[in-house]
Image (spheres, rainbow, N blue to C red):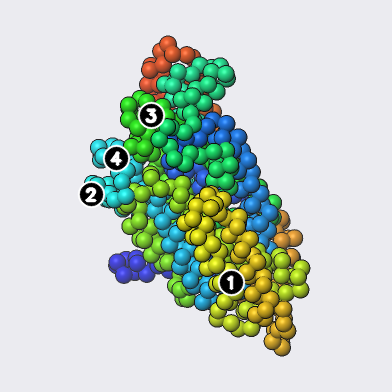
Amino acid sequence: MDDASVKSTLFERLDKLNEFERQPVGEKSLQSGLYFAGAFAGEHVAATEFVIGALFVNFGARAFDVIVGLLVGNLLAVLSWTLVCAPIAVRTRLTLYWYLRKIAGPAVMVIYNVVNALLYCVLGGAMITVAASAVRIPFNIPEQTKWYPEDARFVLVVLVVGAVVVTLAILGFKRLAQFATVCSPWMLLMFVAGGLIMLPQLGTTASLAELWRVADEQIWSGPRADQVNPLGFWHVVAFAWVCNLGMHIGLTDMALFRYARRASYGLYSACGMYLGHYVAWICAGVMGAAAAEVLMRPLPTLDSGSVAYTSLGAVGVLAVVVAGWTTANPMLYRAGLALQVITPGWPRWKVTLIAGVITTIVACSPFVFTKMLDFVVVYGLILMPMGTVVVMEHWVFPRLGLHQFWASRRRLVWNWPALVAWIGSLVLVAILAWVGLVDLYFLFLPAWCLAAIIYLVLAAVSGARGPMPAGDEGAPATGRGATEETSLSQTADTPADASRPAAPDGKSRLFYLSGAVALVGLALCLILPLWIWLSGPAGYEDRVALFRALIFWITLVYFVSGTIWLSQWERRR
């Protein structure tokens, strides 16, 4: 077969990767809860948790602020996914990007989607940067903690990591979820293992009282004398809630939940929030504080790769790389979907490839280590107002007697009330931030309220209350009517392949054997670090050396057996 034929066959296969970019997800494509648990855990037990967990230490938070504040803030985030984002996604089976076209018109959708895609490219680039911070270690490339790369070899590493991430994102939602399902339990345990192994470096014993003393005095010890704006309890609560604001209140995770069988699948977001944004952040804070003490360097000068390598050795490098991949993949996937709906006739893989090139270029600038906390809040504030517009039209309009999809039904290119609501709320955010009246982490509350009020009032006087054009009864052709959506939601719980015969006995034995081996591997990833911590200071170095010698082989066995188990589970379904 000549090169032209090979390329033609490859492109044809890529073109067949249907991700329902412009139409509702079909019943047979709905996914089980396991995939959502894996996807959320994989995305939010991420490489940036090394960065964010350490930044809580740098920015002067106290132990109580972190441990209790994160409990409250993450609960608010889970409720936002469950009560706001998932119900709309399950009802419509559409991405936000295409549903927004029905509400705001094509022109507003184009503007929003371009902004959305660029922001997700920056976030995805940050994840690739963090992964590259670990890959650089075997090549003795210096740490990159400035806004710009200082070593050409680091740029080369970023390009290679970016190529892998783009390839996985092109394969689509199911492949991303499968990859994350296998990786996420192991990644979480690597955070826990790193924290447990480094606790003796901070002088802790197996006493809970001693553990709390070290946490309050040596890890999250409060603001330094030169700290201008330290993080307090409510700052931590607000950050945990709004760091994913664009995804839940901003509704961009409709791209994921349109595959859910029920709206209650939003609760699976807890797998990401409490495993990643709670356990991983706390463990990362421990690792960061201990690594700074071991290396005798200020924590802000250490990147994620250095922290993980100091704590876990070579497997720590692998943990950062895998965590970066599993988080960058869904970011790039969302960016590709956002761009795809404004490029008629282009298959999603081509658009995702373009987004991937942009993302990889962004990743060459390692800004993530200094501005991550602020950026994740700002990107949420930019995306959130358009999610507010969708919430108003989806839920509030019918209760006020206003017409849903009024702009599309009137064939308007611009839904100018939506555009004004978006811009108006951003202007308010800019003014409040500039005068310092409201802290950055709390700006989303007045911004959401203003966007809701502006859109309701302006839409009512612009045509949403008046009569609709004759012969137009509802949603445009790109969506589904209420009856069809309700029918889909009611029947989605029935597996499309329920009549498939049971797996042969041989495959059943392989299923259970591989699952048992994988569970043993995960158990060892926890038992060995606990043994190191609970055994006291005597022989500590020898135990750590043994752990680092064994954990590589344990990890290898886990990934092989876990992949086999997931493959067998898929066949049994």
Question: What residue is shown with label 2?
Answer: 152
C-beta proximity under 8 Å, tags 2 and 1? no
Disc nearer the start of the sequence (4/2): 4
Question: What residue is shown with label 1?
Answer: 418
Q: Is residue 564 above or below residue 415?
A: above
Q: Nearer the viewer, residue 308 or 484?
A: 308
Q: Neighbour class for label 2 at 10 Å: few (<14), some, many (≥20)?
A: few
Distance between the Cα atoms at labels 4 and 3?
A: 14 Å
Amino acid found under the numbered disc labelled 4: Glu
Q: Specify the quadrant that holds the N terminus.
A: bottom left
Residue 206 falls left or right of residue 55: right
Q: Residue at x 54, y 30 (%)?
A: 63
Disc nearer the start of the sequence (3/1): 3
The image shows residue 403 at horizontal and vertical percentages of 71, 76
Disc nearer the start of the sequence (4/1): 4
Q: Is residue 380 above or below residue 212?
A: below
Distance between the Cα atoms at labels 2 and 1?
A: 45 Å
Question: Could you say which disc has been placed on residue 143 in the image?
Answer: 4
Question: Could you say which disc has been placed on residue 291 in the image?
Answer: 3
Amino acid found under the numbered disc labelled 3: Ala
